[in-house]
Image (cartoon, coloured by chain):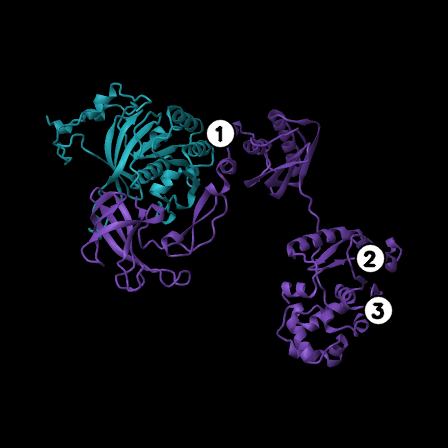
Amino acid sequence: MDLSSLPRASQLVPDSNAASRWRPGLARRQGRVLHSEIFAPSHEAGGVACALALALDDLRNSGDDRLEERPLLWVQDEASRKKTGRPYRPGLPPELRHRVIHVAAKGAADALFALEEGMRCRDLACVIGEIHGNPRELGLTASRRLSLAAEKHGIPLFLVRHDAKRDLGSARMRWEVRSAPSPRGCWNPAAPGLPSWHADLFRARMHPPSEWILRDDRKALVAERVAERPDASTDLSPDRSPDHGDLVHVAGAGSLAAG
Amino acid sequence: MMLADARTLCPQLQVVPSDPAGDLAFLERLALWAQRWGPWSAMDAPDGLLVDVSAVAHLFGGEERLLADVQDRLAAQGLAARVAIAPTAGAAWALAHYGPPAAILPPGADVAAALFGLPVASLRLDADVLLVLRRLGLKRVGDMAELGRDAVQRRFRNRRSPAANPLIRLDQLAGRVPEPLLPVLAVAMPLVQRRLMEPIRHRPLLDQVLADLAADLVRELEARGSGARRLELGLWRVDGEVVLRRLELAAATRDAAHICRLFAARLDDVEAGFGIEMARLSASWAEPLALAQADLEAAAEQHGTSLAACIDRISVRLGAAAVRRPVPRGSHVPERAQGWASALEPEPASQHMLDFHARPLKLLDSPEKIAVLYASPDGHPRRFSWRGGVHEVARVEGPERIAPEWWREKGHVRLRDYYRIEDGEGRRYWIFRAGLAGDGRGTDRNGGIPDWFLQGLFA
């Protein structure tokens, strides 16, 4: 009997089991993730780009046509504005270009206020925040407050933390994102290709930790799994031994609120 | 003559700065007040008023008594006035400006014949037309009638505006052509106020008064079918000081709770002193807002605020300039291709942008200078250092040459060669070289070595 013809252990885990691995387009099944935190270095735009890509993935898969034309609130504190610049309309994803409302907050307290007000607003598609460092105002309490507001009103928040330590937080999904080398384009191999990001989902309530290479090919979010061990062969040939990585976390690695 | 010269000649000269806007506002008020003599009035800026007194003279005891009343009342206000009554607005204007004092042209009189003796300036013509007429030797209105219509028509055949064509003005004077006038209408500002029995000194009481005022104002606005865009709250203190708080809203609103909430954030620094004895709330800018069915669906009420309310709340705390929306602008220079408009303004019509070139996701507020290592001065960059980190260039696309806008900038602005860069770790940047070696536009006039800048971060 050929082993490869049998279903893999990971496929035997029923769909109803919440502790399945994250993948793009999950919003269609499980609803949108309401509070994500993305840690990113401030000398690149990978974190924000990845947040936008995740937000777009949610919007495309939410199955709600009313979200199509709703605006998006983008809040930046002053340090993020200085270090990473302001959103530039010609470079934004075409679906979001005309929908951005930008809030230039001074400090973290003002930014948190704007984020919370944004999540209370029923006319927004989602809220994107950028906060630099680990300000005192953004503690576990403030983070929990944001989570509760997001859950109460159902407006997702993507909070990008530039140059921040992984402090306590109550986000449902916490990512560590940095830019990854892009695939070679077919027209000009010497030019930078489709933007790619290395995203490490290190803490999630519903999913085991996993590492991904994400890219947005204008139609959908494409995710490739990064091998767990650096020495593992990267080719995904079917005769490789089945990957039981999933089962380890099913047992009860549901994350605590604190990271 | 210069003011200094005039003062030298006549040291007792009194000088008052001119205030055209104030004069116009005064004329507006005067036009409304002048409606005591007729059903409607129009402004004739900068210094005239037209009042329709058709069939109202008998209320004042005849036209002579009416004019006398006008002169008395204006003189009581300290205004010097010349008045006249005539069947047409043009004739009345001519008589008031150039006719005898308090002239009255009875209805049915031959208007044109009565005014033949007046100078041509009484036709309300532009200065250049008056100059032409004077050069032609036409000094009186009657001169033109003697000349004949065809001759005047030939001379001014391509002038359409009444102020440039004497024939049209003549016809208006005689009543052969209608002359529409724009009447002045009084629009009362929605305003509510409360005088308080006891001066209040504490915040909870003030909040209560504000809630009452807001409810009154909402009722007032509802009656007019409008919503407030700008609100002014005035608090009169016992010692005569007035505290003013102004609020602008992103969209017209008639929601008392929303108004109270926005003002609450602005009342923290009110100094009550010995107490506040009067509060007044006015909507100095109101927009039509149709009456709407109250939301029957309870879920919608629990489920958060509307977009306009959300923007109001944020901009009250962070300032109106903090909440904005990026809009495209007609320019090919990257930092000018994007402007910022207020959040709920409709997007201006613009040409669709051509996506020939990739543009970065984020643009730095000002380009940051970087040190670049290159093989040849106009070749691709190899390595650059920015903010203390060194970036090896792994992939590069460029140059995309963007020339300065010569119609906006000075001649020494250099062109830019933009490169899309991906460094060894996959970080993508937008850098440019300002100028070319030897283009003669550098800081030293013989063409300094071009500087490199980092302007944007790609996704």
Residue A193 in view, yes or no? no
Chain ID at mark 3: B
Crowd around label 1: few <14 · some 14–19 · many ≥20 (10 Å): some
Instruction: Please say if the residues under marks 1 and 2 sit with CB atoms less than 8 Å apart.
Output: no
Which quadrant is home to the N terminus of chain A?
Answer: top left
Q: Nearer the viewer, mark 1 or mark 2?
A: 2
Q: Nearer the viewer, mark 1 or mark 3?
A: 3
Q: Position of residue A137 (x, y in %)?
A: 40, 28
Chain ID at mark 1: B
Q: Nearer the viewer, mark 2 or mark 3?
A: 2
**Vertical arrangement, residue B309 with respect to residue B418, above or below:** above
Chain ID at mark 2: B
List the residue tagged with mark 2. B71
| Relative side of B392 to B65, left or right | left
Q: Foreground: B298 or B209?
A: B209
- Whole-Å distance between the Cαs marked 2 and 3? 24 Å
Residue B331 lies in quadrant: bottom left
List the residue tagged with mark 3. B109
List the residue tagged with mark 1. B303
Image point (42%, 60%), residue name: B408
Q: Position of residue B66 (x, y in %)?
A: 85, 57
Crowd around label 2: few <14 · some 14–19 · many ≥20 (10 Å): some
| Relative side of B65 to B152, left or right | right
Label 1 element class: loop
In the figure, what tint was chain B given? Answer: purple
Chain letter of the cyan region: A
* Co-location on one chain, circles 2 and 3: yes
